[in-house]
Image: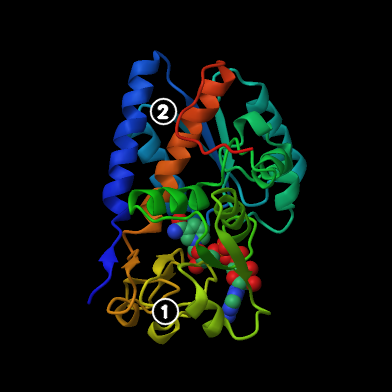
Amino acid sequence: MSARIIDGRALAAALNAETARRIAASGFRPGLAVILVGDDPASTVYVRGKDRAARAAGIAAESILLPADTSEAALLARIAALNADPMIDGILVQLPLPPQIRPRAAIEAIDPAKDVDGLSPVNVGRLFAGRPFLIPCTPLGVMKLLAAADVSISGARALVIGRSSLVGRPLAALLLTADATVTIAHSRTRDLAAECRRAEILVAAAGQPELVRGDWIGSESVVIDVGIHRLPGGGLRGDVAFAEALPVAAAITPVPGGVGPMTIACLLENTLTAALARRDQPARGQPGRG
Ligand code: NAD
């Protein structure tokens, strides 16, 4: 049997259409500022993609391109100005940053009410307390993919491979809030294959191309592949050996066309969530549990 493919592209298109509809109905245009320091080629492509998608949804998007030698103080001053700007609802600092700027300092400078990447300490704390507000976009996208694929999370054994603040940790918190029994694997985990075989929901976010092999996957398991790796000759691979996993898993996300498109779609939704909260209107679509 072949695994069911979970189509992230279709789900992202539907979410973007819904966000655009809600923005059109809101009577205002949310403002999003994306700051890029330097000209890292991959980051430049991501920032352009975010800008384009935001504008298409009716968001007033602004890309702020700063030179690679920008000082930390200058970046923090720029963020402070955006915090104070009433037209701006969302602020995102594209990572990685040049070595003279501490990423933590930049992230912690963003007003938590405008922190659409969900990485500031207030939003991380709320997430781990089971009362999330702005949720990091990639983990939020993974939860939406699981929901769209009708995966039953409550009581399921979930394995998250990776413990980064961007993906692994927040995703583990979300799965826990959704009542999964969560294991977090990382670079020091012994016998990752055995951990994978036990998992009913397996999320790979290790940043290692094709780390998860077909014979690590149980026949009932749902596999979400967060990894993105560019091949030297073109094309993309994930953290899962897709061709080996396809005949074994119950359901799987492809790379490309799985988690990737959901990340930007969730950024747009987060921008609307922040805009509604700043205007004191209730946001829908965010999981919130006590
Ligand atoms: P990261 O490098 O910050 O973290 C990787 C994590 O994986 C670490 O916690 C590490 O302990 C763990 N790890 C590394 N090797 C391992 C191994 N052999 N076994 C078990 N654990 C191992 O990476 P990240 O920012 O969390 O991103 C992970 C992957 O997801 C990357 O491929 C990245 O490109 C991709 N990514 C995709 C999206 C998207 O929108 N699809 C967004 C963010 C990141």
Tell me if 79 is positioned left or right of 271 in this view.
right
Q: Residue furthest top?
A: 27
Q: Nearer the viewer, residue 76 or 68?
A: 76
Q: Which residue is mark 1?
A: 217
Percent position of residue 182, x then y? 59, 63
- The C terminus - image quarter: top right
Q: Amino acid at mark 1?
A: Ile
Q: Residue furthest front?
A: 155
At which x and y percent is residue 272? Answer: 47, 28
Rendered location of residue 190, percent (x, y): 65, 84
Image location (x, y in percent) of residue 70: 68, 46
In the rendered view, tell whether residue 249 sits above or below residue 100: below
| Real-space CA distance between mark 2 and mark 1, rounded to the nearest whole angstrom | 41 Å
Quadrant for ligand 1? Answer: bottom right
Indicate the quadrant containing the N terminus: top left, top right, bottom left or bottom right.
bottom left
With 49 as the anchor, is 119 left or right in this view? right
Residue 63 - label: none
Look at the image and tell me whether residue 266 can be seen. yes
- Quarter-wise, where is residue 75 in the image? top right
* Residue 59: mark: 2
User: Vertical placement of 59 versus 228: above or below?
Assistant: above
The residue closer to the viewer here, 61 or 266, is 266
